[in-house]
């Protein structure tokens, strides 16, 4: 057997091996379109509280712990690969079904996961700096820029009043009379 026939028969055996079914097909389950697990991780059926406005409001105030920096509601309704947000959602629904108010559910999450579970920290204590410092910095920078521009405007006005206009004037042209005549002729041609 030469090399060419050896590689040809090896390739043919490989193709036949790849096409051979690994398991005999079962009746209706052989069709992958009828197997929901073939499409990915299965989801629980939608319950009444899953789309409740109260639950949505709670979930939009709490951060998902998967690291995506989205709130729980957005993460569970847009990132279908996340396994954290559905579990957090079930935890929220469970707490709400025990009779806790939305504020108590949020407080329970803060107690369990810490303040980083909130989408926005409460405006108290040191957190106030995060709310006030950026606005004060923009206000201070705007004030400083305004003062600098007003000072420069006044300096320019004083320089013009003290005779700076002569220094700022354009020097007279040093063109010869022939050049001036050609320039006038060119301008009249362009204008026509």
Image (spheres, helix red, strand yellow):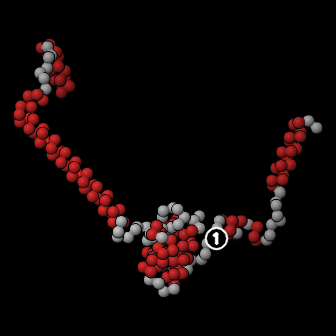
Q: Residue at the far left: name it.
A: 162
Q: Name above or below for residue 38 compared with residue 165.
A: below
- Residue at (75%, 70%) from the top-left corner? 29
Q: Where is residue 131 in the image (x, y as percent from the top left)?
A: 33, 63
- Residue at (82%, 60%) from the top-left corner? 21
- Residue at (54%, 64%) from the top-left corner? 66
Q: Where is residue 175 in the image (x, y as percent from the top left)?
A: 15, 16
If the image is split into quadrants, where does the N terminus sit?
top right
Local packing at callout 1 (Cα closer than 10 Å; few below 14, some 14-19, many 20+) is few
Q: Choose between 121 and 126: the one closer to the eye.
A: 126
Q: Would residue 3 be visible to someone looking at this image?
A: yes
Q: Name above or below for residue 104 compared with residue 61.
A: below
Label 1 sits on a secondary structure element that is loop
Residue where numbered disc 1 is placed? 42
If the image is split into quadrants, where does the C terminus sit?
top left
Number of numbered discs present?
1
- Residue at (61%, 75%) from the top-left corner? 44
């Amino acid at each position: 057997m030469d090399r060419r026939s050896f590689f040809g028969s090896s390739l043919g055996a490989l193709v036949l091996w790849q096409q051979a079914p690994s398991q005999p097909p079962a009746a209706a389950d052989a069709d992958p379109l009828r197997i929901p697990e073939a499409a990915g991780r299965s989801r629980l059926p939608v319950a009444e509280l899953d789309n409740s406005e109260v639950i949505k409001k709670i979930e939009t105030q709490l951060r998902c712990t998967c690291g995506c920096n989205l709130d729980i509601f957005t993460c569970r309704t847009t990132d279908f690969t996340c396994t954290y947000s559905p579990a957090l959602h079930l935890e929220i629904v469970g707490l709400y079904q025990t009779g806790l108010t939305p504020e108590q559910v949020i407080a329970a999450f803060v107690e369990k996961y810490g303040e980083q579970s909130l989408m926005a920290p409460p405006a108290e204590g040191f957190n106030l700096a995060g709310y006030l410092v950026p606005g004060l910095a923009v206000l201070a920078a705007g004030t400083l820029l305004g003062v600098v521009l007003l000072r420069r405007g006044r300096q320019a006005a004083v320089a013009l009043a003290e005779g700076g206009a002569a220094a700022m004037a354009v020097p007279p042209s040093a063109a010869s009379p022939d050049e001036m005549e050609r320039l006038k002729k060119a301008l009249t041609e362009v204008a026509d």
